[in-house]
């Protein structure tokens, strides 16, 4: 979720350039599993359950890619990464892809040499405060102490917001989301700032979540999505179109419940192409014809994944908002499968 931009930029870019020369798709097939970088633990987005099985909104993308490539959504090695280690892990080839609430920025694309294959959550930076603090707006935070991950775009956004509004703050530096929660609940800082989805996730784990509010201001754009290394377009296409398959499936009415039969029963040619009962899209990607059907079958379409992990009926309680389909006033939009 945090956004270290310049950490080891030259080293990361050099590693990425070297590793990308190899074909990741062939490597994953030969290995028989996908190495997917995830967060160290963020409720609803990526965390092991009581049985040690990884679950969450971002985890579902990893499982979908594994199913598309290997035919098995469990053929994944989940590799926890921190804000400081995630980019080096991807650049060095330790992981094949990163699905970890990471913001798509110019410097990460151009300077660090990563390809963001799409956006799976449109977010923005917000603030969480105890109700007892008695504030209703971030503009009321003059002189506040703020828990913030240092060396991140979140830190820069915070500085810009307070400067623009001519108010001051005292940063309380933290390294991980778990540390931020601990410090915040202990009263070491007045407020905690990060992506709004992360704040909702953190609040849902509190003993008394109703004692904390999310302030109304969203102070940045944070398009979050999976990423791969520059220079391996074949692999980038696989990850990108797997994400788009989940998005398109929701728009087209393809679900985990009907994916096994709708490809043959429908008269919709795009559904047929998507699910491989017509055309050669799978072959173009170097995958089996039913790659998208397998990806959808693992956890459902985008809407199903959202509802199950972070939607309004979950403890996280996020509304679709900007992440609704374009046909419902949101920004979610898949290129056509043709």
Image (spheres, rainbow, N blue to C red):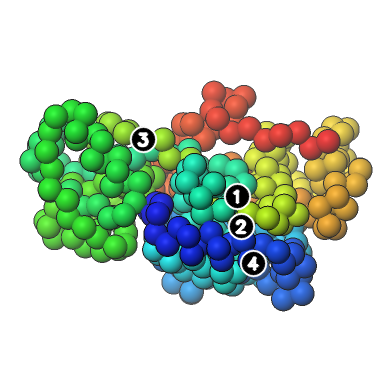
- Contact between marks 1 and 2 (CB within 8 A): the answer is yes
Mark 1–mark 3 Cα distance, whole angstroms, equals 21 Å
Mark 2–mark 4 Cα distance, whole angstroms, equals 8 Å
Please give the name of the residue rendered at 75% of the width and 54% of the height, measured from the top-left corner: 234
First in sequence: mark 1 or mark 4? 4
Q: Nearer the viewer, mark 1 or mark 3?
A: 1
Residue designated by label 4: 19
Circle 2 residues within 10 Å: few <14, some 14–19, many ≥20: many
Circle 3 residues within 10 Å: few <14, some 14–19, many ≥20: some
Label 1 sits on a secondary structure element that is: strand
Please give the name of the residue rendered at 29% of the width and 62% of the height, measured from the top-left corner: 175
- Residue 163 on image: x %, y %: 19, 33
Q: Nearer the viewer, mark 2 or mark 3?
A: 2
- Contact between marks 2 and 4 (CB within 8 A): the answer is yes
Residue designated by label 1: 115
Please give the name of the residue rendered at 57% of the width and 53% of the height, measured from the top-left corner: 114
84 and 336: which is toward the camera? 84
- Residue 3 on image: x %, y %: 39, 51
Label 3 sits on a secondary structure element that is: loop
Whether residue 236 can be seen here: yes
Whether residue 257 can be seen here: no
Q: What is the quadrant of residue 290 in the picture?
A: bottom right
Mark 1–mark 4 Cα distance, whole angstroms, equals 14 Å
Task: Give the numbered dot on residue 220.
Answer: 3
- Residue 169 on image: x %, y %: 13, 43
Mark 1–mark 2 Cα distance, whole angstroms, equals 6 Å
Q: Is residue 89 left or right of residue 20?
A: left
First in sequence: mark 1 or mark 2? 1
Residue designated by label 2: 229
Q: Quadrant of the C terminus?
A: top right
193 and 85: which is toward the camera? 85
Q: Is residue 98 left or right of residue 7?
A: right
């Amino acid at each position: 979720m945090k956004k270290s931009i310049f950490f080891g930029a030259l080293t990361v870019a050099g590693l990425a350039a070297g590793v990308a020369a190899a074909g990741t798709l062939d490597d994953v097939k030969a290995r028989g599993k996908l190495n997917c970088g995830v967060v160290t633990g963020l409720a609803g987005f990526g965390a092991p359950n009581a049985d040690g099985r990884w679950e969450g909104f971002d985890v579902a993308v990893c499982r979908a890619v594994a199913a598309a490539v290997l035919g098995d959504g469990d053929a994944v090695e989940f590799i926890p990464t921190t804000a400081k280690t995630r980019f080096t892990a991807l650049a060095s080839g330790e992981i094949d892809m990163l699905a970890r609430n990471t913001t798509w920025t110019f410097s990460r694309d151009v300077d660090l040499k990563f390809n963001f294959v799409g956006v799976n959550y449109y977010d923005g930076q917000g603030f969480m405060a105890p109700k007892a603090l008695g504030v209703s707006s971030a503009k009321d935070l003059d002189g506040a102490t703020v828990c913030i991950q240092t060396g991140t775009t979140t830190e820069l956004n915070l500085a810009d917001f307070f400067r623009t509004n001519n108010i001051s703050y005292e940063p309380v530096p933290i390294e991980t989301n778990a540390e931020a929660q601990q410090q915040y609940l202990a009263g070491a800082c007045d407020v905690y700032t990060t992506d709004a989805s992360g704040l909702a996730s953190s609040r849902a784990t509190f003993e008394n979540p109703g004692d904390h509010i999310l302030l109304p201001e969203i102070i940045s754009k944070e398009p979050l999505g999976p990423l791969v290394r520059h220079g391996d377009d074949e692999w980038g296409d696989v990850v990108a179109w797997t994400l788009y398959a989940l998005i398109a499936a929701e728009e087209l009415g393809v679900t985990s419940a009907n994916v096994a039969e709708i490809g043959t029963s429908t008269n919709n040619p795009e559904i047929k192409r998507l699910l491989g009962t017509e055309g050669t899209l799978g072959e173009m990607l170097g995958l089996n014809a039913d790659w998208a059907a397998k990806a959808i079958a693992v956890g459902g379409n985008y809407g199903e994944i959202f509802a199950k992990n972070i939607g309004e009926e979950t403890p996280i309680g996020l509304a679709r908002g900007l992440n609704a389909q374009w046909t419902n006033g949101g920004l979610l939009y898949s290129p056509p499968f043709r």
